[in-house]
Amino acid sequence: MRVLYFLLFIGLAGEAVAQPGLVTGTVKADGKPVAGASVSWTAEKRLGTVTGSGGQFRLELTAGDSGTLVISHAGFQSRTSAMRVAAGETRVEVVLERVLTELDEVVVTGVSRAMSIRESPLAMKTVSTKDIEQSSAANVIDAISAHAPGLAVVKTGPNVSKPFINGLGYNRVLTLYDGLRVETQQWGDEHGVPMDDYAIERAEVIKGPASLLYGSDAIAGVLQLFPAVPHGQDGALHVRVLSEYQSNNGLVGNGLMVSRGSEHWSWALRGSERIARGYTNPVDGRVYNTGFRTGNASAFLGYSSRDGYSHFNVTWYDNHQGIPDGSRDSLTRKFTYQVYESPGENVLEPFVDDIKSRPPVPEKQLNSYDLSALTQRIQDLRVYTDNGYSLGIGDIRLSLGYEENRRREYNHPTSPEQVGEYLLLRTVSYGLRYNAPVFFNLELSAGVNGMYQLNRNDAAATDFPIPDYRLSDLGSYLYGKWKKGNWTIAGGVRYDRRSVRGDEMYASSNPLTGFYRQTGSEDTLGALHPFAPFALDFQGVSGSIGATVRLSDNISAKANIARGYRAPNITEMASNGLDPGAHIYYIGNLNFSPEFSLQEDAGLTGDWADWGFGVNVFNNHINRYIYQDQAVDAVGVPLVIVPGNRTFQFQQTDAQVYGGDAQLRISPTLWRGLRFEETFSCVYGFNRAGRYRKTGSEGEYLPFIPPPRLLSVAEFERGIWRVRAELDHNWRQDRYLGLYQTETPTSAYTLVNCMVHVELKVGERRRLQLQAMVNNLFNVAYQSHLSRLQYFEYYTASPNGRLGIFDMGRNLCLKAIWEMH
């Protein structure tokens, strides 16, 4: 209580002596004013504006405040200036220089205040609005991964992409949406990130343990997604309309954003829809049941003053997704569909499913936009607020969010309306951070954050992959950054504690329907007992320390060492059931201990007018690494609990993951607008258990490790035109977990992509972008090593010598974006 009184006193005292301070100025480049440049005061507080047609800006602040003035615009080097606001008016003149690299781009993820990539000791990457907009990827996660070396995706079809960073994924990658934890049913292979693909303005990626500021679940890194919000204060109505068509799966997508910003208030409304049928490739033709329908709606309301800001957001996501299983005729290789229930699913049905005797899918149904009866539906609601205010000495930030995630999977062909898996996850997330004033070049921050979760299996469900549970998570941290001259040193320490309480469950056959249902503890005679009650507690200390140094105006070096912490997730601990969408029966282990990692990172970057380079390497040792492999019986035969589905059990071992990435840019000043870029990345993952030493694919390698990749880009931009060509080469992956057929090797492949983009101004306030893009120009048949569809196969041989489902073939994307400012 005394602490509360003290903070209240400080806040009132600061308010009592606060005087207005006005910062005005102009932004120019090449001798001309720059309109639409972003001007912000300490990006963490999000007090900002955009420059007008004459490059002018105006910020109302508080005299005496210390912070950083940040001016940025796409295609220019961002400018930052630490300053103390004086009473009255302070006028500044800013000149931006054109750049083709991102070394000085300001980021806010993973740090307490605004920090440029050059200053951050963490390995970081930003993906700009232009990179996302001018992409023909099936979803925004794929678009981001194409521009962020080290970020890969596990895919289960074109609409499901789960991020992996440096070979580690699932909930080891913490995904943030506008600063809020994305907490959904993300443990399965086919669980993507629920969001509006057309609303994401930019993204930031931290590659490496980020447990210091975020706690458990950030052991591999952080993917931060920023939705578009109003940036201007001109009081005018801003409209953005996006439409696209993709030829491969007939995708039709439309998005709309309407916004307005004034001196103190701003608001935005967003909505989108996307619909697609099954995709095609040169091996399988049209892949059955890979279509989807998604709808999104969101609203934003913001208030800002010279003392701080308050933002309120609501988002709604609704996705109907097909569930492919890969069953087909053994001779024609045409896809077939399920007619009867799987063995043991319904005791009243006289017929059971025989995978190899299913009827072929009719052509009309195969090419239809209508989804089959076997689908999944994911709905996600987010309501959250973000607030940052000056206390007179330092500033404080408070965030609070609620997320409700519903996952329903319909896997009963004889009763299409009967839901199989129905999980409801409710999460309350919170965070409080205090940023102290800069003192002797030292910036200190302290905070607490955490969440409370409640998960329930709906009473109408027939499949129960995980138990009902309650989770409580709380952590506190101290973070500091010292900067002087060419040196920046940053780091801190954190303590986390998590408790998980699982409920007991019994299940028995419903005499009316024949499907399984939950039963109470008083009705256990002859019932299954999938889950016993449990109570588990985990705790851990994490931290990091790193430094960057500018060796010259053009060359910078950085190094960082971090200890990460991750508590086991609910699936790893307590799963005991089928996940229909992944076609995997999961078996967990309640005896698992938390993972701890120790990762060393080092990087060197150089940036000149005509060329630039960047090299990053990392080495990560993980104690008690949790992974999944194929379950087998006593003689090594793969265990089959539900026919047609594989059985995976979770294991724990010591592991090592190491690798790096390198970038080379050539942009000759004599040929203005021409750019060449080479990006190479590679990751190696090893199981360090003694029994697997030198066993190769029979246990020595970790699963889900992407092969080495080289992306070559040639781009020319002149006036209203932009032309781009890509050569995407992925090496063969021979370092795979082949023990008990958990994984198989994948062949090398090379994809060619190209794009033509034109931007037209229609009057003073309107802009039209038109673009045509072709991915996989030569219609190459390939299987990504991280595609789960390659394992959807029920035979050991086929007439064409190809097994599993292949990735998407040639795809033409036409996109139009119309904006009114």
Image (cartoon, rainbow, N blue to C red):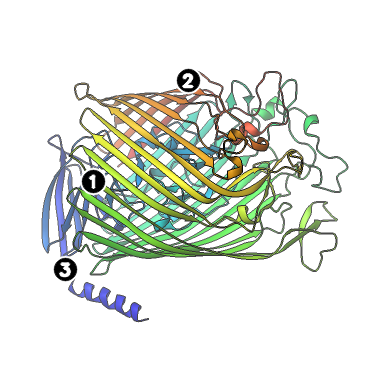
Q: Is residue 615 left or right of residue 61?
A: right
Sequence-first tag of 1 and 3: 3
**Foreground: 53 or 729?**
729
Q: Quadrant of the C terminus?
A: top left
Helix, strand or loop at mark 1: strand
Instruction: Identify the amino acid type marked 2.
Output: Leu
Instruction: Identify the amino acid type marked 1.
Output: Val
Q: Nearer the viewer, mark 1 or mark 3?
A: 1
Figure check: 195 above or below 326 = below
**What residue is pinned by disc 1?**
549
Q: Quadrant of residue 357?
A: top right
- Determine crowd level at label 2: few under 14, some 14-19, many 20+ residues with C-alpha closer than 10 A: some
Figure check: 296 above or below 760 = below
Q: CA distance from mark 1 to mark 2?
A: 43 Å
Figure check: 661 above or below 311 = above
The answer to whether one can see residue 165 in this image is: no
Q: Quadrant of residue 712?
A: top left
Q: Is residue 739 left or right of residue 704?
A: right
**What residue is pinned by disc 2?**
777
**What residue is pinned by disc 3?**
19
